Image (cartoon, grey):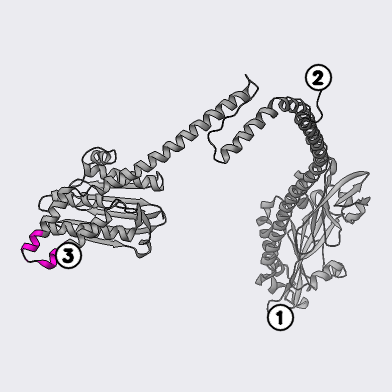
């Protein structure tokens, strides 16, 4: 089969083929690079979050130890004991035993309060007066033996702050106390501030190790280091006391380090203000392995899609190009307003032809329905307005004119003049050329004229009130929508025996739109009668109500219209639901 290189089919095929190959290459490169980058970032974020939680647990541990120390260093009995001059310390065993019992009990009590951490620390009090106490019967410290130690000097010179002494191997320690770290505080006279001694707490390094031991997997290393970079806790106890940098063979870019020719990602998180940090060395293979699995799968999927797309693109180029261009040209005609156009094609018997036939049918129906809707809309609007205007029937006109004649014959010229004035204004609103939409103020004025005429016809039969918010007076509404509702309200009020009608109109705006409420105290309606009113069932007056309801929906949408609430024997409330 000879291919025309200038044909749109060939050009389309070449463009699709080139585009897909380019996309495959770019996506492949992007996938390999960015997937690895994203995985690194995500693993760093997740592990950093885990380290933060571990750090918080360690900080809670240290804070609880500090709380214990706070309670001890301000104990009045302990301060009183350490304040005794060395030469005044009792020599008799009974006095010494009594004095020691309280302090030792205090320390033991604090140890038991610490048992919830599954590790009991060792507490020591060393007084400058030579008195020493511990949670056990004998202390391994005495003033003469430790006063030259730097950590002791740091505690003595501390301004009430806790001093952390890094982990070290205690040759005298056994079990979990083989490696310990210390926390120390000076004990001072609360009044003079004189240093009376020190409080030392020996804590097993295992308490730190237990906080992160469960996170050690896949060749990870986790260290806790102090502000100088010395290792305080580690799985490998031999590294305790070493500088963390000494465990690294080489630093690379972007937190990548080399240990024993294995690449690790270095992740750090601060623990406290003393410079303690928790550091994790995460093997890069842990990150790269899932990233490479995703990359390989994506590349396989892309390769399959490229092969499929080449064949599909070629077939679609042959079948779609010419007929689709034909439809496209016809659609431009339709867009410009020509609905008399038809799509034609030399091809027959395929889906494109069905599309063309459907297009032709759609255009014809669209043309017909547009004309039909325009005609029906116009006729419906004219008929509805004419119908509503015709609600004031000849009988009403006759009665009104008779009333005017009667007033004139009774020489009640002012009343007759007022009635003529109201009557002419109402007739002007009923003219066939009246606007379909008027302001709410104009609509209310028409209703007031209508109501005044009815009052003159039925003196004392009802009262009328109108309360419309000023801010909605200029709101446009379909003309003559209130008259049918007010007419019904007057009629229902007068039908009720021994009842003086009370008709009210209230208009306001709320968050949902404009609301106009027409209320009467007439005979009311049952639920079934309300349904009939809104279904064009019943008298002419009811037809007027449904026409108002439908006109509102036609102008603003089906969610707007009338809402009727009524109780038989008590009255009716009609709510106009209008948009704001």
Mark closer to the observer (3, 1) = 3
Residue beneath label 1, please? 192
Instruction: Write down the residue under mark 2.
Output: 1
Does 493 sit left or right of 485 as displayed?
Answer: left
SS label for mark 1: loop
Q: How many discs mark residues in the rendered view?
A: 3
* Mark 3 neighbour density, 10 Å: few (under 14) some (14–19) many (20 or more): some
Q: Residue 2 placed where, x, y %?
A: 82, 21
Task: State the CA–CA distance, disc 3 to disc 1.
Answer: 103 Å
Q: To which quarter of the image does residue 299 belong?
A: top right
Can residue 496 be spotted in the picture? yes
Q: Which residues are magenta?
A: 405-419
SS of the residue under disc 3: helix
User: Does the stretch in magenta take in 320?
Assistant: no
**Element carrying mark 2:** loop
Residue at figure coordinates x 84%, y 66% from the top left: 151
Q: Earlier in the sequence, mark 2 or mark 3?
A: 2
Label 2 or label 1, whichever comes before in sequence order: 2
- Badge 1: few (under 14), some or many (20 or more) residues near its Cα, within 10 Å? few
Q: Quadrant of residue 104?
A: bottom right
435 with respect to 463 (left or right): right
Q: Locate the C terminus and report the quarter of the image it occupies.
A: bottom left
Against 527, is 247 above or below?
below
- To which residue does mark 3 refer? 418
| As drawn, 59 above or below 175 | below
Q: CA distance from mark 2 to mark 1?
A: 108 Å
Q: CA distance from mark 2 to mark 3?
A: 96 Å
Q: Position of residue 279 (x, y in %)?
A: 81, 53
Residue at figure coordinates x 81%, y 19% from the top left: 1
Pointers 2 and 3 in contact (CB under 8 A)? no
Q: Residue 329 shows which numbered tag?
A: none
């Amino acid at each position: 089969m000879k291919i025309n290189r200038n044909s749109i089919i060939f050009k389309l095929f070449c463009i699709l083929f080139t585009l897909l190959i380019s996309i495959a290459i770019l996506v492949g490169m992007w996938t390999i690079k960015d997937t690895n980058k994203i995985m690194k970032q995500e693993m760093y974020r997740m592990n950093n979050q885990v380290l933060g939680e571990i750090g918080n647990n360690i900080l809670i541990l240290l804070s609880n130890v500090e709380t214990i120390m706070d309670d001890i260093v301000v104990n009045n009995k302990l301060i009183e004991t350490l304040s005794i001059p060395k030469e005044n310390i009792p020599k008799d065993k009974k006095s010494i035993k009594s004095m020691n019992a309280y302090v030792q009990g205090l320390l033991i009590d604090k140890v038991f309060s610490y048992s919830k951490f599954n590790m009991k620390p060792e507490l020591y009090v060393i007084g400058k007066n030579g008195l020493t106490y511990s949670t056990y019967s004998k202390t391994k410290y005495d003033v003469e033996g430790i006063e030259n130690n730097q950590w002791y000097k740091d505690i003595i010179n501390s301004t009430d702050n806790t001093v952390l002494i890094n982990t070290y191997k205690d040759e005298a320690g056994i079990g979990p106390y083989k490696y310990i770290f210390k926390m120390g505080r000076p004990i001072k006279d609360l009044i003079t501030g004189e240093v009376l001694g020190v409080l030392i707490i020996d804590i097993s390094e295992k308490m730190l190790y237990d906080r992160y031991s469960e996170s050690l997997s896949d060749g990870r290393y986790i260290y806790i280091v102090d502000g100088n970079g010395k290792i305080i806790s580690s799985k490998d106890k031999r590294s305790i006391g070493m500088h963390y940098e000494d465990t690294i063979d080489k630093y690379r870019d972007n937190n990548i380090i080399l240990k024993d020719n294995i690449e690790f990602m270095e992740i750090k998180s601060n623990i406290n203000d003393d410079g303690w940090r928790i550091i994790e060395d995460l093997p890069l293979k842990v990150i790269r392995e899932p990233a490479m699995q995703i990359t390989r799968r994506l590349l396989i999927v892309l390769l399959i899609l490229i092969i499929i797309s080449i064949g599909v693109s070629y077939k679609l180029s042959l079948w779609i190009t010419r007929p689709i261009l034909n439809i496209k040209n016809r659609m431009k005609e339709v867009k410009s307003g020509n609905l008399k156009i038809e799509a034609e094609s030399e091809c027959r018997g395929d889906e494109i032809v069905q599309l063309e036939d459907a297009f032709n049918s759609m255009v014809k129906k669209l043309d017909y329905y547009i004309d039909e809707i325009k005609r029906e809309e116009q006729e419906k609007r004219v008929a509805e307005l004419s119908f509503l205007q015709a609600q004031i029937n000849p009988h009403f006109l006759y009665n009104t004119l008779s009333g005017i004649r009667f007033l004139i014959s009774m020489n009640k010229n002012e009343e007759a003049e007022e009635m003529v004035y109201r009557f002419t204004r109402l007739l002007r609103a009923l003219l066939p050329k009246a606007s379909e939409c008027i302001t709410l103020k104009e609509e209310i004025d028409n209703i007031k004229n209508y109501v005044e005429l009815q009052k003159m016809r039925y003196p004392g039969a009802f009262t009328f009130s109108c309360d419309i918010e000023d801010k909605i007076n200029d709101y446009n509404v379909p003309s003559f929508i209130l008259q049918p509702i007010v007419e019904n309200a007057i009629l229902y009020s007068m039908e009720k025996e021994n009842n003086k009608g009370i008709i009210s109109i209230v208009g306001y705006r709320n968050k949902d739109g404009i609301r106009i409420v027409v209320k009467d105290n007439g005979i009311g309606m049952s639920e079934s009668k309300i349904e009939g009113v809104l279904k064009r069932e019943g008298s002419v007056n009811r037809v007027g109500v449904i026409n108002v309801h439908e006109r509102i929906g036609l102008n603003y949408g089906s969610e707007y219209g009338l809402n009727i609430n009524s109780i038989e024997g008590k009255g009716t409330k009609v709510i106009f639901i209008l948009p704001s």
